[in-house]
Amino acid sequence: MAPIRLKDIAGKTEKFARGHRLCPGCGAAITVRQVMLAVGDRPVVVATATGCMEIGTSLFPHTSWRVPWIHTNFPNAASTISGVEAMYRAKRKKGEVSKKIKFIAFGGDGGTYDIGFQALSGAAERGHDFVYICLNNEGYMNTGGQRSSATPMGADTTTSPSGKVLPGKIQWRKDMVRVMAEHGIYAAQACPSKWMDLMRKVEKALEIDGPAYIDVLIPCPTGWKGDPSQSLVTVQKAVDACYWPLYEIEGYKIKLNYKPKEKIPITEWFRSQGRFQHLLKPEYKDLVAKIQAEVDRRWERLLKDAGEA
Amino acid sequence: MRTLTGNEAIAEAMRQVNPDVIAAYPITPSTPVVEKFAKFVADGVVDTELVTTESEHSAMSACVGAAAAGGRVMTATGAVGLAFMFEVIYVASSFRLPIVVAIANRALNAPLNIHGDHSDTMAARDSGWIQLYSENPQECYDNIIQAVKIAEHPKVRTPVMVCFDGFQTSHMIENLYVEPDEVVKRFIGEYKPIYPLLDYEHPVTYGAWDRPDYLMEHKRSQVEGLYAALEVINDVGKEYEKLTGRRYGLIEAYKLEDAELGIVVMSATASTVKDVVNKLREQGVKAGLLRIRAFRPFPASEVAKNLASLKSVAVLDRSWTGGAIGGPLFHEVCSALYNLDTHPKVVNYIYGIGGRDVYPEHIEGVYQDLSKIAKTGRIERLLGYLNLRE
């Protein structure tokens, strides 16, 4: 595949139209725009789980989607697109559809890691030809910032608030890319601040005959309590702290896509957002050390698995 | 003539319809429907894409996705399976997708019970689906075929549940008429989807977000499909009769013309009631039966027309209805009669919960109660139970 060039994508009619209702600095909007540009001229049908992306782009009688698009409920973007794709196969078999059509499902981390996990795992096992993209802002941001199983340890959310005896969320986050890769499918971790890497992964996933999963860490200025103008700078800190490494797994083989020149401490990532501010206080020194140790452990494991250590 | 169970009759009808997609998750007592269909797929006798999902929630989600993509879609379920589909069945009807679902009626937990009653589909009665209740395997077969035509009618475009009593009709073996494949194919005709997702050159948005400024209008327009179905169900029934000689409408009125005492019931129990009516007629008792085939849309004017002149009526409900004064069928019948100038006294009996048997003597008992009410004009007990240990 030839590398994506800015001059090729600039000036294309965007399939994700301007004028959506997502927040300023929303990483989901930026990511979906990148994804739809990576789709290029391929015919595509998109399914979206209930969440920010859905309500921000489909307020009746308006739509941001210049492609066929379907939203049903919160837990079932994967099973909804399974049905669409099954109908496509049925129609192709009968010769009623001749052109190749691609299928993409978007879900937030709630609709992916939690309530939508069963449908996603089932669809991956059945081998439907679709790309599932998790717009992961590490919480239920559409409903006011509650914790999810993608929320990192120590984060202050409305259902895991930091208080007198608890520091915020007390569990580690689910390592979803690894979980999905164990279905024997292409799985990748990406970030909109590294747009070329993200778009290349989308293109690759689209070309794969079968399910593919891409987990994108997206900044949420509202839920993360960060500066909207610094969204991509903020999220890049997660990558440079090796908290959110960019890698892909194909045929159970891990490939690291980006190695920061200098690994920054996790506190730099914490400092950029309101949800972690309490962790910077001296009383949470031990917890921060514990989190740093876990980030290091996961990074070292990844380097080893990718043959980079 | 074929010897088939209710489940097999449904699978046979599905084979003849040859839908584009079936997405299903097996549940007792409808499991044999999908098992039999899976064998048709394995043997290559149908073109269907069979999506064996990991849950009923995903089965209905995939059905919605497939139907929105633009083709014929079916599934089978019941009980907790239907309950697990619940949030998605509203989507199916709101999108006006002509999905046909075979439902082997079964009790809802708890305690766990896998046997027949109507609690599952009664819980889904307000979901905007058409509901047809089948008396026997023959009607299961006939209903599936008619359901395709009803659901796809341009004025209707609404999904249909074909309901039948779990472990009674589902497993009961009967000699039934199966029409030739070509006849079924001609009857249902070609399906022309409206706004299919796969037409990528004309992109559409399914499932937008409605604020308070639109949802009422959308729901109001959706219900028009159900109202239109009242006429379409009758029309399709007449057309089917011309083809097969078997007559179907919204209701079945059995010896009601001159009746004084009437029972209203749905599904398999109607056969037991018919036997009792025959026996009572021999004894000179003016007994009759009104069987509701279409519970949604509810045929209120036909019910009123057929019951108005009776002296007393008993409605038999086969569902557990927490905290209500009687079952859902009772409420509908009372509503249909209430504004008439004269109407019969109406009482309610709950029966058959969790597969509990109902014998002819129980039905005879109901007619005896009705006879007493007809004579005295007084209702002593509004709500009773049949074959209950008390």
Image (cartoon, rainbow, N blue to C red):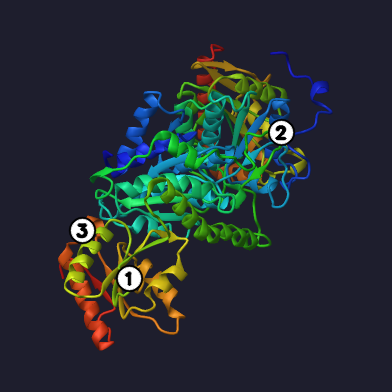
Chain bearing tag 3 is B
Which comes sooner in the sequence, label 2 or label 3? Answer: 2
Residue A98 image position (x, y, % from top left): 63, 23
Residue visible at 18% across and 70% down in the picture: B282
Going by the numbered disc 1, the residue's amino acid type is: Leu
Image quarter in which the C terminus of chain A is found: top right
The Cα–Cα distance between marks 1 and 3, rounded to whole angstroms, is 28 Å
Foreground pick, A150 / B364? B364
Kind of element beneath mark 2: loop
Kind of element beneath mark 3: loop
Chain bearing tag 2 is B
Q: Residues within 10 Å of mark 2 (few under 14, many from 20)?
A: few
Q: Is residue A37 above or below residue A139?
A: above
Q: Is residue B216 visible?
A: yes
Looking at the image, residue B117 sits to the left or right of residue B201; the answer is left
The Cα–Cα distance between marks 1 and 2, rounded to whole angstroms, is 56 Å
Q: Which residue is mark 1?
A: B256
Image quarter in which the N terminus of chain A is found: top right
Kind of element beneath mark 1: loop
Looking at the image, residue B277 sits to the left or right of residue B344; the answer is left
Foreground pick, A157 / A190? A190
Q: Which residue is mark 3?
A: B356
Going by the numbered disc 2, the residue's amino acid type is: Glu
- Labelled pair 1, 3 in contact (Cβ < 8 Å): no
Chain bearing tag 1 is B
Foreground pick, A100 / A281? A100
The Cα–Cα distance between marks 2 and 3, rounded to whole angstroms, is 55 Å
Q: Is residue A271 above or below residue A159?
A: above
Q: Which residue is mark 2?
A: B201
Going by the numbered disc 3, the residue's amino acid type is: Arg
Q: Is residue B253 above or below residue B340?
A: above
Q: Residues within 10 Å of mark 1 (few under 14, many from 20)?
A: many
